[in-house]
Every structure is written in C-alpha cells, then in structure tokens.
C-alpha cells in the first residue's frame, strides 16, 4: 500500500522543476505585458521574489525535509531581493548574513550523516560527502531505499546497477556545488529528475531503450508504460552538474 500511495503522490504533485518553469513563464508574461503596454504590471513584478520564496519552501517540504541547501539558497536570496525591492533593507545590510548559506551546507552534511547512521545496518542507504576529490560508491543491496550525496569541488559517482528495490520509489538527494554527481542505474529503471539547477545542469542522460516487444521507455522523464517510478532524484546544483546514466 505504501508503494502505491508513493507512486500516486509522485504522479499528482507538481515537481520543483515544473514549478520553477511555471514561475519563469509567469514572470515572462508579466514583463511582456509591461513592455508592450497591454497592462501595467510594475506593482505585481515587485512581489515576484516572494513567489521564489514559496518555491524554496515547497522544495524543502517535497523532499521530505531532506534537501536543505537548495531551498535555503533559494529562500535566502529571493527573500533578500524582496526586502531590497520593497525598501525594507539595503544590499549592504543583508550581505553580512551570507554565512547562513555555509551553516545550511554544514547542516545538510550533518543531517545526511545522521540519516545514514539511523538506517538499518545493511547497505540499503548510501551517504557520502566529497570535498576537493573524487569518490565512487557502489550499492548492491537487495532492498535499496535511497541515499544522499554532497559534492563540493569534486566528483561523486553512485553505482546502483547491482541494487534491487522492494519499496518504490527509492530517493536519492544530491547537493552539488562546483562539482559533478552521477547516479548510475539499471537500464530498465524509470527515473524522475527533480533536481533544481542554478547556473548548472541536471539531466537524465540515458537514451531511449526498447523493453520487451511492445514497451518503449522514455528514460528522460517518468512518462512510461510500466509500474510507476523506480527512483526519484532530488536536490540542488549550483555551478556544477548532476546526471543519471547507465
């Protein structure tokens, strides 16, 4: 029952990337109305940063309170811009609070280690932190449930080709700053990418593959003719890359 409810929830709730795209479209429409003189939208545009604050909060809740860095960056930057636009503060007054982002990064790393330590003693959960280096992890659990990887100025690879799932979908949370994270999965897994890239990239780089005689899986996305999503990849990428490969 939990698997069915998780699948239904993942299909019904909008993803962070969808909401981000919708917000960008909304801002573009408001700007178009303003520049063409169709409607006066200047007053509405000044509250656009608040929409991104709500997006950051939504990303935090949607990740099951596991992804911290990305939402904090979005909420912090958007909130600061909103205060400046409304005249409640100046950039000079707010810039002194930038260490909050470092604190959020440290909390994310510590929380990831805590989540890993409270998991069962087998390899069902993979957790790792890479700073100025490269790490390759392989999970061969027969009941893989998820993981979280933090990469800063480095490269991390999580190989799941020998892992099996009993409770779908498994979830992997990525935090990438000036680095690269790769998740290698079996060819027939359906992966849903919900990573938010800010001056970075996040993509399912696998090609389309035929499964069986009459089933074709579109591996870049989650619209497929099979029993739901196998893996959900969430997180945040800034000045880096996150990818799913086989």
Image (cartoon, rainbow, N blue to C red):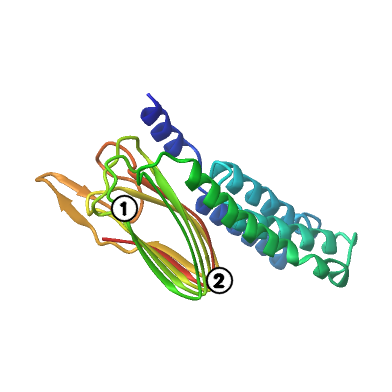
> Is residue 82 at least partly visible in the picture?
yes
- Above or below, comparing residue 7 to residue 207 in the picture: above
Residue depicted at x 38% and y 43%: 170
Residue depicted at x 55% and y 71%: 199
Residue depicted at x 36% and y 44%: 124
- Residue extending farthest to the left is 213
The residue that disc 2 covers is 199
Q: Which of 240 and 38 is in front in this view?
A: 240
- Residue extending farthest to the front is 121
- Above or below, comparing residue 141 to residue 155 in the picture: above
Q: Is mark 2 on a helix, strand or loop?
A: loop
Dot 1 alpha-carbon crowd within 10 angstroms: few under 14, some 14 to 19, many 20 or more: some
- Above or below, comparing residue 218 to residue 154 in the picture: above
Could you tell me residue 15's position as x and y percent? Answer: 50, 47
Could you tell me residue 165's position as x and y percent? Answer: 29, 40
Residue depicted at x 77% and y 54%: 47
The mark lying in front, picked from 2 and 1, is 1
Mark 2 vs mark 1: which is more N-terminal? Answer: 1
The residue that disc 1 covers is 139
Could you tell me residue 110's position as x and y percent? Answer: 59, 54
> Is residue 40 at least partly visible in the picture?
no
């Amino acid at each position: 029952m939990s698997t069915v409810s998780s699948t239904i929830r993942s299909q019904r709730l909008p993803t962070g990337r969808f909401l981000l795209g919708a917000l960008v479209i909304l801002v573009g429409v408001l700007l178009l109305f303003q520049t063409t003189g169709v409607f006066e939208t200047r007053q509405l545009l000044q509250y656009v940063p608040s929409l991104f604050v709500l997006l950051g909060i939504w990303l935090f809740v949607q990740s099951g309170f596991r992804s911290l860095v990305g939402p904090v960056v979005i909420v912090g930057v958007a909130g600061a811009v909103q205060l400046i636009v409304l005249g409640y503060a100046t950039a000079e007054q707010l810039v002194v609070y930038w260490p909050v982002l470092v604190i959020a990064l440290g909390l994310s790393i510590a929380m990831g280690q805590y989540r890993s330590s409270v998991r069962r003693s087998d390899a069902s959960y993979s957790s790792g932190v890479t700073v100025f280096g490269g790490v390759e992890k392989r999970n061969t659990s027969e009941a893989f449930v998820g993981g979280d990887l933090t990469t800063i100025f480095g490269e991390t690879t999580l190989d799941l080709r020998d892992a099996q799932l009993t409770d779908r979908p498994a979830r992997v949370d990525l935090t990438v700053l000036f680095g690269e994270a790769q998740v290698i999965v079996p060819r027939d897994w359906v992966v849903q990418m919900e990573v938010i890239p800010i001056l970075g990239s996040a993509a399912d780089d696998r090609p389309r593959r035929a499964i069986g005689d009459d089933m074709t899986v579109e591996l870049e996305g989650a619209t497929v003719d099979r029993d739901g999503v196998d893996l959900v990849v969430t997180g945040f990428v800034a000045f880096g890359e996150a990818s799913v490969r086989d």
